[in-house]
Image (cartoon, rainbow, N blue to C red):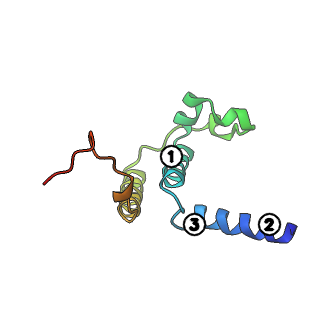
């Protein structure tokens, strides 16, 4: 039984980290964490990483080079493509129960 649980958690983690997460909320969290980990000054400002014992970022400044900006630009376009692949039509609420005719 423990082996099944470990395999399920491993599949979930691998999918979350390297592939498209199962839910839109997990996608948002993945994008935020990947963005924050690349911005040491943001991590210091938020103070969230210190709660988990992660302090390596305190000795670094944000990379504002053109090469880093180009990598970020490409990454954000990849995130946008991933976001567009989610079916969010079922999550929209109608306003006041009215339907467009």
**Which mark is in front, 1 or 2?**
2
The numbered mark, 3 or 2, whose residue comes first in the sequence reads 2
x and y, in percent, of residue 57 in the image: 63, 39
Label 3: how many residues lie within 10 Å, few (<14), some (14-19) or many (20+)? few
Q: Is residue 69 left or right of residue 6?
A: left
Q: Which mark is on residue 97? A: none
- Quadrant, the C terminus: bottom left
**Circle nearer the N terminus (3, 1):** 3
- The quarter of the rendered structure image containing the N terminus is bottom right
* Residue 74 x %, y %: 37, 60
Residue 2 left/right relative to 87: right
Label 1 crowd (10 A; few <14 / some 14-19 / many >=20): few
Determine the image quadrant of residue 83.
bottom left
Residue at screen point 53% across, 47% down: 38
Which residue was labeled with disc 3?
18
Q: Is residue 96 above or below residue 18?
A: above
The local secondary structure at tag 2 comes to: helix
Q: Label 1's element?
A: helix
Q: Which residue is mark 1?
A: 32
| Marks 1/2: CA–CA distance | 26 Å
* Discs 3/2, front: 2
Q: Earlier in the sequence, mark 1 or mark 2?
A: 2
Q: Can you identify the residue that label 2 sits on?
A: 6
Q: CA distance from mark 3 to mark 2?
A: 18 Å
Give the percent coordinates (x, y) of residue 97: 27, 44
Q: Residue furthest right?
A: 2
Report the side of 55 relative to 63 (left or right): right
């Amino acid at each position: 039984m423990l082996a099944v649980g470990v395999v399920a958690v491993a599949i979930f983690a691998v999918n979350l980290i390297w592939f498209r997460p199962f839910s839109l909320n997990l996608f948002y969290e993945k994008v935020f964490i990947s963005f924050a980990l690349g911005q040491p000054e943001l991590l210091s400002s938020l103070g969230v990483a210190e709660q988990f014992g992660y302090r390596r970022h305190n000795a670094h400044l944000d990379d504002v080079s053109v090469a880093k900006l180009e990598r970020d630009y490409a990454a954000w376009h990849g995130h946008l493509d991933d976001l567009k692949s989610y079916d969010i039509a079922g999550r929209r609420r109608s306003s006041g129960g009215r339907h467009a005719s």
